[in-house]
Image: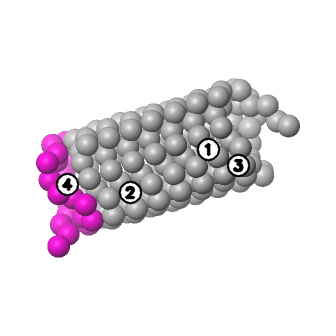
Amino acid sequence: MSVNLSGQDLSGQDLRGRNLAGAHLRDADLSGANLSGENLSGADLTGANLQGADLNGIALEHADMRGADLSGADMRDASMFCAELIEAKLVGTQLAGADLSRAELRHADLSRADLSEVEAGRANLDDSDLGSANLRGSDFRRAKFRNANMQGANLEDADLRGAKLTGANLEGAIGWRSK
């Protein structure tokens, strides 16, 4: 049986050590909460506020985070394989070393986010904002960036083999060499 904490104010709380896999956290306020190292795989975090939360090393495989606000959160080394982050806000979020393989990030705002050394093969970032984001050394093989804003992004040593970049704005992108 999964936990239902939808709409609850859990801001600033230490939530480590709880079994929240598959939990219902729709529209919950988790801003500033500590969930580092926890397993929230399959959880429903639709519309949740996770601004500034400590999500370092969290497992969010197949989690639904559509429309969630993760701005300024620490998500280093997070595992988000096949996660739904459509229209999510990740402005300035620390995602270094995270696994975003096959994640859905259409229309997401990742401006100024640190996506260095991420694994994001086959991720869908169509129509996303990656302006001034750091993608240095990341694996985006076969990812989709159609109509994405990548203006001023750092693409040094990023692997974009097979990526779909049709209509992407790469103006001022660092390390970008069009072929």
The residue that mark 4 highlights is 9
**Quarter of the figure that contains the N terminus:** bottom left
| Numbered mark located on residue 140 in the image | 1
Asked if the residues shown at circle 3 and circle 1 are in contact, with their CB atoms under 8 angstroms apart, the answer is: yes
First reached walking from the N terminus: tag 3 or tag 2 = 2
Query: Callout 2: few (<14), some (14-19), or many (20+) C-alpha neighbours within 10 Å?
Result: many
The residue that mark 3 highlights is 163
How far apart marks 3 and 1 lie (CA) works out to: 7 Å
Specify the segment rendered in magenta.
1-25
**For the residue labelled by badge 1, is the local secondary structure a helix, a strand or a loop?**
loop
| Numbered mark located on residue 84 in the image | none
User: Taken as a whole, is the magenta stretch helix, strand or loop?
Assistant: loop
Seen from this angle, which residue lies furthest right?
Answer: 179
Instruction: Tell me which corner region of the image, top left, top right, bottom left or bottom right, holds residue 61.
Output: bottom left
First reached walking from the N terminus: tag 1 or tag 4 = 4
Comparing 87 with 117, the one in front is: 117
Residue 135, given in percent of the width and then of the height, sits at 58, 34
How far apart marks 1 and 4 lie (CA) works out to: 36 Å
Nearest to the eye among marks 2 and 4: give it.
Answer: 2
> Which amino acid, mark 1?
Phe
Nearest to the eye among marks 4 and 3: give it.
Answer: 3
> Which amino acid, mark 3?
Ala
Residue 159, given in percent of the width and then of the height, sits at 65, 38
> Which amino acid, mark 4?
Asp
| Numbered mark located on residue 61 in the image | 2
Asked if the residues shown at circle 2 and circle 1 are in contact, with their CB atoms under 8 angstroms apart, the answer is: no
**Quarter of the figure that contains the C terminus:** top right
* Identity of the residue drawn at 55% across and 39% down: 111
Asked if the residues shown at circle 3 and circle 2 are in contact, with their CB atoms under 8 angstroms apart, the answer is: no
> Which amino acid, mark 2?
Glu
Instruction: Tell me which corner region of the image, top left, top right, bottom left or bottom right, holds residue 178.
Output: top right
Query: Callout 1: few (<14), some (14-19), or many (20+) C-alpha neighbours within 10 Å?
Result: many
